[in-house]
Structure formats: C-alpha cells, structure tokens
Image (tube, rainbow, N blue to C red):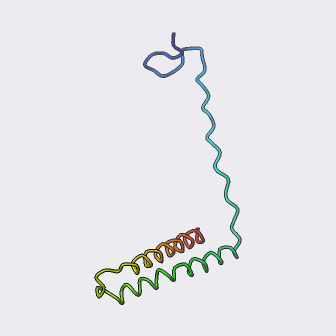
Amino acid sequence: MTDQIPGTGSPPEGQAPAPIPPPPAPPPERPPRNGAVSVLMVIGGVILLLPGLCSLFFIVMLGSNTGSVGPLGALWLICFIISAGGIAMLVRAFR
C-alpha cells in the first residue's frame, strides 16, 4: 500500500498533507572591515602591482629585439605573478 493516491501526488482522503519545511536561514552578514585595514590593503596591492608594470615597460621597450628572453623571461613571469597577487589584494580591499 502507498500513502498517496496513484497519479495525483496527493495524500489519501482524511489525511492532511505533509507540512512544508521552513526555508533555510540566510547566512550571517560579515562584520564591516576596519577602514585602516582597507587602506593598508590598497597600498599593499598598489606596491605589488609595481613589479609587473616595470616588467611590462621593459617588455615593450625591448620589443622584438631579443629573439630569446631566457632567464629574463622567467624574471618577468615572477613579476607578473607578484602583480596578480596585488590585483587580488585590490579586489579583496574593494569588496
């Protein structure tokens, strides 16, 4: 035997439908960040952007004069990774 009438999705006569569960509670709000922390994050993020900007400047200035960048390319890659951390810090500061 089933608890529902076949094909209707409703309970048999004489029985109340199952109660609907309440919606889940919303997640608690984060407390506001201290303004000084945000300012420090912005300053740190801008400082971390500088190596990438410097690398980009030298890539443009050298242009296609160098056929193979070798160890200089590895240094540029490291600088761009550091700058990516600066971008992430700036995004986090402005959230």
Residue found at the far bottom of this picture: 61
Q: Quadrant of residue 67?
A: bottom left
In this orientation, which residue lies closer to the viewer: 1 or 65? 65
Residue sitting at 70 percent across and 62 percent down? 31
In this orientation, which residue lies closer to the viewer: 5 or 28? 28
In this orientation, which residue lies closer to the viewer: 38 or 70? 70
- Quarter of the image with the C terminus is bottom right
Residue 89 horizontal/vertical position (percent): 57, 71
In the displayed structure image, the side of residue 79 where residue 15 appears, left or right: right
Residue 61 horizontal/vertical position (percent): 36, 90
Residue sitting at 40 percent across and 87 percent down? 58
In the displayed structure image, the side of residue 61 where residue 30 appears, left or right: right
Residue sitting at 67 percent across and 53 percent down? 28
In this orientation, which residue lies closer to the viewer: 42 or 57? 57
Q: Quadrant of residue 19?
A: top right
Above or below, comparing residue 51 to residue 85 in the picture: below
Residue 12 horizontal/vertical position (percent): 54, 15
